[in-house]
Amino acid sequence: MNHELIDSPEYGSETDALLKVLADAPAIDGSYEALLLDREDLPDPALAGLPDPRVSLDDLTIELPGRTLEARVYRYATQPRPIALWLHGGGFIGGHLRDIEYATSGIAANGNVTVVSLNYRLAPENPYPAGLHDTYDTLQWIREHRTELNGDGRIVIGGQSAGAALAAGSCLLARDEGTPLPDRQILCYPTLDLHPDEDWHEWYFATDEIPATGVPLHADSLAGLPPTLMLAAGRDSLRPDALAYASRLDEAGIPTRLVEYADTMHAFLNFPAALSAGRHAVELIGADLRSTFSAPPS
């Protein structure tokens, strides 16, 4: 496995400037009421950027047993293409598909794929494994509705931070349940281990009995998982999770590409208007998908 390091002189200064902006913002007091208010905040285009104008956007309702989920579809091509299920971050307790539209639309355009961006259920109202089940069941839903979505039968799953954990956990669950696996998983700065000091941990994990689908680094084996693109950030406390999981995938014989963005921060894909690393990563993910699906489906 190659460990690709991507660096640029502006990464550090841009990260410093953004961290100062975020530090100067009003602090959230950590209460449930404050969390609800934070969920209502709309992304600032000066930081989050705007959707790629090359793609079409359509809202989608996904009916699953006992719940209805919201999603948004980003289409670049008119002919059938692979479908990428994408999961936002937010510590399992926050975040929304609208926070990452630069990334999801850009991945659709640069990757020549159709992206389905999912709003999964959040804790504390819906602790583990609700979000995992939403992700896994949506994977099956996409397979069943691929004709309506203009899919060609090939599927990718990816996400950022908590969303990447749900993607990784869903692949483990699919392997263990014997259901079809995605053709590729894309994990961007994922949280894959226990992090009891983080605010979200207690709200998300309502039990001490947590299987590997919730903490993928604790899986006994990673054999049989899809080929993987792993993105890490040099100034991210979760960097060890990404590096350790990539190493274990490689040791298990899974084709794994590890790309680290030096001197940038966690969640850099959420701030592409302020962080050139985020813009670069969207293009890199797109190029990776074009390469993965360069041949027509068999």
Image (cartoon, grey):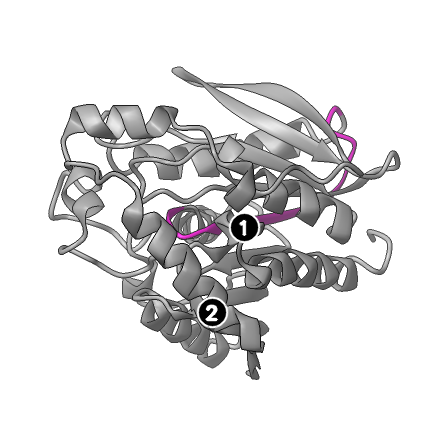
Ranked by sequence position, the earlier of labels 1 and 2 is 2
User: Between 115 and 128, which is closer to the camera in this rendering?
Assistant: 115
In the image, taking residue 241 as reference, residue 119 lies left or right, namely right
Q: Is residue 81 above or below residue 38?
A: below
Residue 162 point in image, percent of width and height: 37, 48
The answer to if 157 sits in the magenta stretch is yes
Number of numbered tags placed on the structure image: 2
Q: Which mark is residue 158?
A: 1
In the image, taking residue 199 as reference, residue 147 lies left or right, namely right
Q: Residue at x 63, y 38 (%)?
A: 50
Q: Is residue 104 above or below residue 287?
A: above
Q: Residue at x 21, y 28 (%)?
A: 34
Residue 12 point in image, percent of width and height: 46, 72
Residue 43 point in image, percent of width and height: 48, 34
The image quadrant that residue 142 belongs to is: top right
Q: Few, some or many C-alpha atoms within 10 Å of disc 2 (few <14, some 14-19, many ≥20)? A: few
The image quadrant that residue 240 belongs to is: bottom left
Secondary structure beneath dot 1 equals: strand
The answer to if 124 sits in the magenta stretch is no
Q: Is residue 258 visible?
A: no
Q: Residue at x 67, y 26 (%)?
A: 145
Q: Which residues are magenta?
A: 148-162
Residue 8 point in image, percent of width and height: 58, 76
Which amino acid type is marked by label 2?
A: Ser
Q: Is residue 11 above or below residue 173?
A: below
Q: Few, some or many C-alpha atoms within 10 Å of disc 1 (few <14, some 14-19, many ≥20)? A: many
Q: Residue at x 76, y 36 (%)?
A: 53
The residue identified by callout 2 is: 13
User: Between 126 and 28, which is closer to the camera in this rendering?
Assistant: 28
Secondary structure beneath dot 2 equals: helix
Quadrant for the N terminus in the image = bottom right
